[in-house]
Amino acid sequence: MKKGLQWSFLIFGTIIGGGYVSGREIWLFFGRNNGRAILLFSLLFAICCYTILSISYKQQTKHYKTIFNSLIGQKSSNFYDFMMIVYLLFTTMIMIAGSGATFQIYQIPNWIGIIFMALLLIWIFSHNIDQVIKVNTIIIPLLLLSLFSMILLFLNKEPNIEFATEVQANYFNAISFTAVNILPIISVLGAVGYKIRSKKEIIVASIFSTIMLGSLTWLYNYSLTLIESEIDLYEMPIYAILVRFPNWVLLLFTLIIWIAIFTTAIGSMLGLVSRMQIHTELSQYKIVILFISVIVPISFIGFQYLIELIYPIYGILNLYLLASIIIYPIRTCLKAE
C-alpha cells in the first residue's frame, strides 16, 4: 500500500506542475465547465497508468525506451524516443519559465526565479534517485491538500456566483489532454520500473492517482468557469481565485505553485537523465548541468506562450501512442489465448 501511494505521488508530481497547478493547462484543454469531458479524461488516465505501470513492472525498466518498444515496436519507438527527449526538454523549460513567472507576482525580476530553479535542479540531482523520489513523497501530499483546501474555500466563499451551466462536452480535448500527459508519465515510471515489486502497487497507484487527479481537475475547472471573465487578466489563472483571499494566502500559494512547478521539473529531468545515461558515462549531476545550460536561455520566452504553443501540438502528436496504450491490454489478452 505504501509503495503504491509512493508511485501515485510520483505520477501526480509529474502531472501537476506549472501548467496544471496554474490553471492555464486545464483551462486551455477543458474550458467552460466540461465535467463530462473530465470524466472521460479520468477513465483514459486510469487505463494509461495501469498499462504503463504494468509494462514497467514486467520489464523491470530503468528508462522509458523499453516501454515504447513494448507499446509500438522498435521502429515507431525511435520516433517517440526523439519526441520524448524534445518534450522533456520543453517541459523542463516551461517549468523554469514558470518559476520566473511566480517571482514576477511580487515584482521580482523573472530572471532571478529562472536562475534559482536551475540551481536547485542541479543541486537535487547531485543526490541519488531514491532521494529524488522521496522529495515527491513528502511534497505532493501537502500540495494536494493545499490545492483542494484552496478550491473548496473559494467555492464556499463565493456562494452568490451564478451557477455555471454545462456546455457541450469537448471530448476531443479530453483525449488530447490525456495524450499530452502520457509522455511525462512514461518517462518517470520507465525510470523506476525496476523498483516496483508487486501488482498490488500498480493497482493502488492507478486508482489513487486517477481519483485524486480527476476530482481535483473537475473542481479546479469548475472554479475557473465561475470567474472565466477574469482569467485572461493573469498569466496564471489561479491568481484570479487567489486575489479573493488575504495577502498571506496569496504568498502561501505562490510558494505552493512554485513547489508544484519544481516537482514537475524534477520528474522531467529524471526522465532525461535516465535516458541519457544509456549513451554516456557522465554522472546524472553533469548531465543535468549540460541540459540546464541549454534550457535556461530559451526559458526567457515566457511561461504562458510556451504552454499554449507546445501542449496542443503534443496533444495531437501523441494520439497514436494513446491509442496503443489503450489497445495494449486487449492485445496482450488475445496473445495469451
Image (cartoon, rainbow, N blue to C red):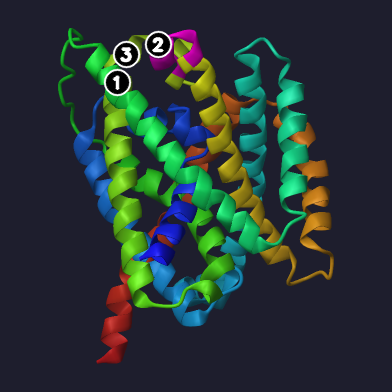
Residue type pointed to by label 2: Phe
Residue extent of the magenta highlight: 239-248
Q: Is residue 324 at all visible to an observer of this figure?
A: no
Image location of residue 189, percent across then percent down: 51, 63
Compared across the picture, whether 272 is left or right of 286 comes to left
Which picture quadrant has residue 75? bottom right
Q: Is residue 95 visible?
A: yes
Contact check, label 2 and label 1, Cβ < 8 Å = yes
Q: How far apart, in angstroms, are the residues tagged by discs 2 and 1?
A: 9 Å
Q: Is residue 130 above or below residue 37?
A: below
Please, what is the three-letter code of the amino acid marked with disc 1? Leu
10 Å neighbourhood of mark 1: few (<14), some, or many (≥20)? few
Are discs 2 and 3 less than 8 Å apart at CB? no
Pick whichever of labels 2 and 3 is earlier in the sequence. Answer: 3
25 left or right of 188? left
Q: Earlier in the sequence, mark 1 or mark 3?
A: 1
x and y, in percent, of residue 100 in the image: 67, 24
Instruction: Identify the residue under disc 3.
Output: 227
Report the mark closest to the observer, 2 or 3.
2
Q: Residue at point 42% right, 15% down?
A: 242
Q: Does the stretch in magenta take in 243? A: yes
